[in-house]
């Protein structure tokens, strides 16, 4: 007689399990996040109990085994090839995460079309949309004639059966992993059990058949939907598609890659006819710059191994509020508070009677501490009302003591700035690696105070 299936309640927010339902998760405090799912049975370890063995002996290999170089499917979408480390690896699983509406389906349809027209067999399961909707999108992308095989299917068994029949599939796209469901699991699609089971089955299938697998996973700002976080551990490559929906720029960022470097980025622009690759992002981010306005400083940043110049904009205005306003877009508010505190304590410039707004142009999010110096320059410029010299770039981390600390990748930052016609870089005096770029003068400072003097005297 089959044993009754044991039920468990799993928090969809923190994955804690509980044997009883409650309105609030005891572990993370999230409300209404406990969902009933079947408890997964862990098979007994063969041999230990002595009675039965459940496994068989496997062949062990030596570490010093000559492995041939990983074959790759080169997509010819250079930005995508860059983030995957030179193309998609057959048999490997890739997860593309991102907020709804950011452009995942568009990117994958363009990828599918590019590969299908190379003569590869591409199967696209669009569980979220009807095939008619995908057709409308492909019309917009002008790829209607690409030989992609399409199905709007969400049942895991049917998907595996479809893939097992016919000639070998080179790439399978599952859009999205949250829509899949398996008959064997008593939980709604999108729950952790379903997402985990579907991913495991598909990944195993892909490895066996050396089919490349791309899974789409939705995330929300609060990380509410179960899925991508669970799947991240199982797949070989994790890419995140990011961007601000108010801006056309989209960044594809490598978070994990078993076959290449992480922290790489690919830059795209969402246009009327799909995603366009942006090979020179700095030109784009600086495109609409008004260099003569006070409060704007150009930061020479690094995303992965790639230099990107971006404008940091500050607005400092007298405040009528008891507690002046501090607003940041594309930056961390704690870093802004720190810079304001350092400017006050070490340079004697107080913003306590002023509202401060700091914005990273183009919808980019900056996490690099090297942006501190550019932010400080923008703040001082807006405060004094003097525009910064138009041909300057800034980078350097500010420490609490008011010193400017050295940053890495100096040479590539300078090279990128030189390419775009900048002539002077303001950076830390520490850590001089001898990096120089022709026609680019370096203004090295040790203390933030030196920048404050420079800004107030500049014309
Ligand atoms: P989509 O790829 O459906 O996003 P996701 O799969 O991540 O949910 O598309 C997102 C948005 O992109 C949608 O609001 C419409 C817009 N879009 C364009 O601006 N141009 C285009 O050519 C396409 C296909 C979509
Ligand atoms: Mg989609």
Image (cartoon, rainbow, N blue to C red):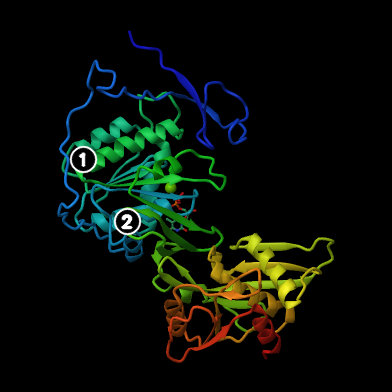
In the rendered image, which quarter is residue 192 located in? top left
Q: On residue 95, which mark appears?
A: none
Which of the marked residues, 2 or 1, is nearer the chain's N terminus?
Answer: 2
Counting from the top left corner in percent of width and height, residue 60 is at 17, 40
The residue most toward the top is 1
Q: What element carries label 2?
A: helix
- The residue wearing badge 2 is 111
Give the answer, above or below, for where 289 lies relative to 442. above
Counting from the top left corner in percent of width and height, residue 113 is at 29, 55
- The residue wearing badge 1 is 208
In the rendered image, which quarter is residue 352 located in? bottom right
**In the visual, does 268 lie left or right of 290?**
left
**Which residue appears at 65% of the width and 60% of the height?**
334
Q: In which quarter of the image is ligand 1?
A: bottom left
How far apart marks 2 and 1 lie (CA) works out to 23 Å
Q: Is mark 1 on a helix, strand or loop?
A: helix
Is residue 393 in view? yes
Closer to viewer: mark 2 or mark 1: 1
Give the answer, above or below, for where 349 lies relative to 165. below
Give the answer, above or below, for where 225 lies relative to 383. above
Counting from the top left corner in percent of width and height, residue 195 is at 40, 35
């Amino acid at each position: 007689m089959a044993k009754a299936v044991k039920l468990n309640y799993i928090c969809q927010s923190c994955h804690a399990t509980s044997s009883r339902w409650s309105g609030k998760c005891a572990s993370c405090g999230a409300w209404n996040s406990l969902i009933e799912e079947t408890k997964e049975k862990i098979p007994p370890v063969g041999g230990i109990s002595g009675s039965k063995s459940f496994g068989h002996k496997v062949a062990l290999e030596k570490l010093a085994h000559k492995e041939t170089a990983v074959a790759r499917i080169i997509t010819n979408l250079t930005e995508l090839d860059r983030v995957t480390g030179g193309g998609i690896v057959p048999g490997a699983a890739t997860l593309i995460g991102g907020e709804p509406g950011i452009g995942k389906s568009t990117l994958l349809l363009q990828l599918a079309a590019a590969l299908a027209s190379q003569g590869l067999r591409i199967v696209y399961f669009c569980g979220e949309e009807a095939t008619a909707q995908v057709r409308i999108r492909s019309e917009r992308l002008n790829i209607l004639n690409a030989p992609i095989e399409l199905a709007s299917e969400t049942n895991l068994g049917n998907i595996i059966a479809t893939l097992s029949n016919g000639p070998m599939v080179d790439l399978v796209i599952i859009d999205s992993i949250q829509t899949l469901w398996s008959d064997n699991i008593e939980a709604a699609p999108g729950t952790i059990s379903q997402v985990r089971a579907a991913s495991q089955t598909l990944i195993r299938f892909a490895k066996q058949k050396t089919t490349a697998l791309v899974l789409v996973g939705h995330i929300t700002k609060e990380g509410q939907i179960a899925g991508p976080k669970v799947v991240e551990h199982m797949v070989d490559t994790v890419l995140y598609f990011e961007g601000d929906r108010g801006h056309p720029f989209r960044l594809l960022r490598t978070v994990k890659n078993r076959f290449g470097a992480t922290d790489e980025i690919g830059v795209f622009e969402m246009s009327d006819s799909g995603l366009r690759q942006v090979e020179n992002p700095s030109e784009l981010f600086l495109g609409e710059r008004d260099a003569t306005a006070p409060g704007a400083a150009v930061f020479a940043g690094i995303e992965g191994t790639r230099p990107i110049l971006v404008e940091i904009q500050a607005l400092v205005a007298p405040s009528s509020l008891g507690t002046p306003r501090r607003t940041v877009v594309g930056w961390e508010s704690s870093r802004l508070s720190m810079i304001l505190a350092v400017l006050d304590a070490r340079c004697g410039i107080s913003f306590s009677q002023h509202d401060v707004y700091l914005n990273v142009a183009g919808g980019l999010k900056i996490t690099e501490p090297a942006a501190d110096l550019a932010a400080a320059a923008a703040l001082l410029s807006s405060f004094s009302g003097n525009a910064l010299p138009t041909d300057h770039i800034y980078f350097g981390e500010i420490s609490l003591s008011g010193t400017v600390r050295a940053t890495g990748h100096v040479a590539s930052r300078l090279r990128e700035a030189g390419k775009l016609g900048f002539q002077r870089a303001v950076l830390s005096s520490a850590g001089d690696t001898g990096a120089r770029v022709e026609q680019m003068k370096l203004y090295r400072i040790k203390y933030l105070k030196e920048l404050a003097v420079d800004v107030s005297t500049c014309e």
